[in-house]
Amino acid sequence: MDRNPKRKLALLIPAHNEQVVVTDTIRSAISAGQPREDIYLVSDGSTDWTVDLAYLMLDNGHVIQQPQSGKGIAILTGLQYFGIADRYEWVHIADADGMFGPGYFAELTQRLSVKFCAATGHLQSLKAGWISKYRTFEYTFGLEVMRRIQAAIGAIPVIPGATCIYRTDILEHLDFTHESLTEDMDLTIQIHRKKLGKIAFIPQAKAFTQDPKDFRDYFKQVMRWYRGAWQVMLRHKIGLRPQRVDGYMVWMVAEELILLVEISILPLLAWWGQNYGPISLIFLTDLAIFFGITVWAAGVNNRADVISGFPFFYFLRFVNLFAFFRAWYEIVVQHKFRSVAPGWSTDGRRYRIATEVVNSKKA
């Protein structure tokens, strides 16, 4: 009989210059049910007070510093240094700017099962400005509807960094050293490609994430996401393998193409034929659906302020479309960003998290 059975779940936080948020993130994890002795932090070349603040919050030996090498390497370093695979059944990797709803870890540990190799919880946007209103719309539809479909058909394309859980016996099969702007997506596709098992969606476990505080940061973020997505699609030859995730991601690209046609070619044809009736009907139908989802998202999240942001949603929707095809041109046509500089930048992007808002939400 094993006298030292593995503990259930470790929480590993990779961080780079997170002094503004790291204390609240660790405190949130403890409040959400994660024992302090099961929380670990890896600082990737932080030059601020991140390490000192983490030392004040965590047990001795649970914080390490490495030269700036990138988020993927920071995760790998933490897994190896702390012996996570030997000591735990599961590991939760979380962003240093995230927070966890009441009972988050209890919900996870209750539902984690060996029939899954990885899992993800429900991600919500923290209330903070007009960008968060749009993200609330995106996350609600994306998780309440699309994530459930992805989980049902076995085609979850990305386990987001804020709520990313792996069964530790699959870690040796994952390559954390891939150069990618979206390491969470790359690792998820590796799970599909290597047929390591099913990915669970646990909507009862609610995590929260910071959104960009202004348009400049928002655009930088979506450009990084889309560049990373195209990197991953090329590396793993998405669309050329007979896996369900390929079919789903091809459909995601097709959706962007349909939207491009809707806002460019159809208006041009309407102008050419001097017949604006059909294009007007398409636009009004789209507007009605878009607004209906906005009202629904506001109700689901008990955030009436989301509705007031609706006039900006179409603008950000078109910004996303522009970023998607610009990233495609840069990655696929120009062959840019084939290598990624180590580390990641958080300078000027972080702001204090309203912990009382999260703690007051129902799990």
Image: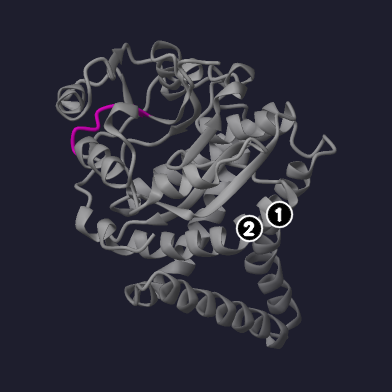
* Image quarter in which the N terminus is found: top right
In the image, what residue type sits under mark 2?
A: Arg
Residue at image point 54% right, 64% down: 141
Q: Amino acid at mark 1?
A: Ala
Q: Is residue 341 shown left or right of residue 143? A: left
> Quadrant of the rendered structure where residue 133 is?
bottom left
Q: In the current view of this chain or complex, which residue is farthest to the bottom?
A: 277
Q: Report if residue 14 lies within the magenta region.
A: yes
Q: Which residues are magenta?
A: 12-20
Frontmost residue, 81 versus 332: 81
Question: Viewed as shown, does residue 152 lie left or right of 48?
Answer: right
**Neighbours of disc 1 within 10 Å: few (<14), some (14-19), many (20+):** few
* Above or below for 242 versus 76: below
Q: Residue at x 54, y 32 (%)?
A: 166
Up-down relation of residue 317 to residue 172 (above or below): below
Viewer-side residue, 132 vs 163: 163
Reading the image, the residue beneath label 2 is: 148
Density class for disc 2 (Cα within 10 Å; few <14, some 14-19, many ≥20) is some
The x, y position of residue 104, in whole percent, is: 39, 49
Q: Residue at x 22, y 53 (%)?
A: 355
Q: Are marks 1 and 2 in contact (CB under 8 Å)?
A: yes
**Quarter of the figure with residue 96:** top left
The C terminus appears in which quarter of the rendering?
A: bottom left
Q: Which x, y percent locates residue 242? A: 85, 38
Residue on which disc 1 sits: 152
Q: Is residue 144 magenta?
A: no
Quarter where residue 308 is shown: bottom left
Residue 273 pos. (x, y %): 76, 81
Task: Looking at the picture, tell me which residue is in the foreground, 323 or 60.
Answer: 60
Residue at disc 1, secondary structure? helix
